[in-house]
Image (cartoon, grey):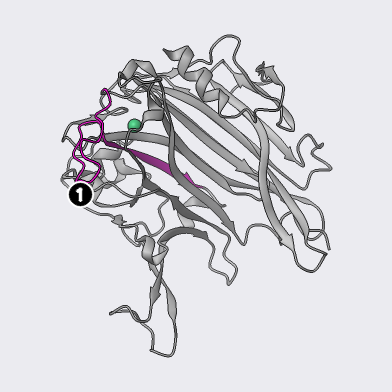
Amino acid sequence: MITRGLVVLLGLFATGVAAAQPVAPCPTSDRSEQYFPPGSAPERASSGWRIAWQLWPATPPNGPAAKWVIAGAEFMTRGHDGAPRWLKVLDHLHLSEMYVPYDSGHELFDISANNFSFVPIAEGTSVAAAAPTPPCHHRQIVLEEVRDDDVRWVDDRRASQIGRGHELVLWATLDGGNYRYVVRYGFADDGSIRARVGATASNLHHRRRDRDPRAEVVAEDDIHVHMAGWRLEMHLGDPAANRVTLLERRACSDPGAACGTERGAVLERRTFLNEGSAVWRPERFGMIVIENGAGERRPGYTMVPRSAGVVRSARPFSQSDFWVSRRDPQALLAGCARRIPPEWVFIDLPTWQSCPQTLVGHAAVLWHQSAAYHWPRGEDFGAGSDHRDSGVATTAWSGFDLIPRDILPGTPLLRR
Ligand SMILES: [Cu+2]
């Protein structure tokens, strides 16, 4: 089952026209380094990434499930003088939870309630050769490749010249019982980071076909959500000096918006001075910005959700989409009698934050839920079959982007 799931999964990277090639071992382990344009020497590159990662085994206190942790990510760009400038962007990033509430009421917690591990790639697995550098694997578990990242921009001043980007992609696959979760991090040449998790493999139930296509309500036991709980720590110079702020576009027609009727909208800011949480409102383009420094151009990163929706269940952790907490929970014991749950457990956030502490002068942890709603379809099953073992559910993704703000000296890749 593992082998079949991975072969189908890896096939997603094939273009259908490119020749396949085996996945070669990476030259180093637990660390990736890439310069852009792909394959360029560090002294000639316009940008680059250095990434460290760790595989935490499925044992306490990490577990019960294994964790694949991005333990540090540094981005290199060049200043106006052409000299390389390195900035440590991330201290930590990992997938903390995979909550699967079924419409039937049944719930699964695939990370906090199971001792699942990451699975190795199958022997003989191949991927497309279309990538500009050969893909490789670390320990048969973490795959690394550099791939095209689409049109970065079109320059109206230069005969519609196109800037085409690339990104370094690291990904690994978590066992989820009948499911496999593809955890993927993209580090792009423009300084962006993309975190995604894709749910694939066998459905838990056989397919329940729509009983009446004219019915206004579909109540079937196989429909469910894959809600990912992410945990990240930004660095950006001095983590204790970072500020975490919710940004929302408020239309002036919206009651309570702080603007006059002559304007169309304003961008509202709410900085987290204390631990807390916030709801994502897509109608307000809700996003989180993490900024460092106090000047007019404060370097930072904006977290933009990439979800089809959000989960709201009876579980308190599902009532918010962004959570901000302190990195040093042990220090909070003084003066606060609350119980301190394990640091790494997403679902304990509401208990943890029942006694919110100041964030001023303290490094923060940012948590986020992303979700995909899985309404099983015929393509998840074998030909003419409704049996769960007859096919593989194609990957459903959710996640978030981290987009640099006032980090690069100008438009990436642009030469003028
Ligand atoms: Cu699913």
Residue reaching furthest top?
Answer: 123
Where does the image place residue 110, in percent across and percent down from the top left?
Answer: 30, 27
Q: Is residue 110 above or below residue 141?
A: below
Q: Is residue 357 left or right of residue 1?
A: left
Quarter residue 211 falls in: top left
Magenta span: predominant SS is loop
Ligand 1: which quarter? top left
- In which quadrant of the rendered view does residue 223 lie? top left
Residue 255 appears left or right of 11: left
Q: Is mark 1 within 8 Å of ligand 1?
A: no
Q: Is residue 113 visible?
A: yes
Residue extent of the magenta highlight:
206-234
Tell me, yes or no, whether the highlighted magenta stretch contains residue 208: yes
Figure check: 295 above or below 120: below
Residue 243 shows up from this direction: no
Front-lying residue, 113 or 324: 113
The answer to whether residue 346 is above or below residue 176 is below
Q: Is residue 160 left or right of residue 188?
A: right
Can you say which quadrant of the picture contains the N terminus? top left
Residue at 67% across, 36% down: 147
The C terminus, quarter of image: bottom right
Q: Write the residue at 47% across / 39% down.
A: 196
The percent position of residue 368, horizontal first and vertical second, equals 37, 47
Q: Position of residue 160 (x, y in %)?
A: 78, 62
Q: What amino acid is labelled 1 in the image?
A: Glu
Residue 98 magenta-highlighted: no
* Figure check: 175 above or below 225: above
Residue drawn at point x = 32 percent, y = 51 percent: 321
SS of the residue under disc 1? loop
Residue annotated with mark 1 = 216
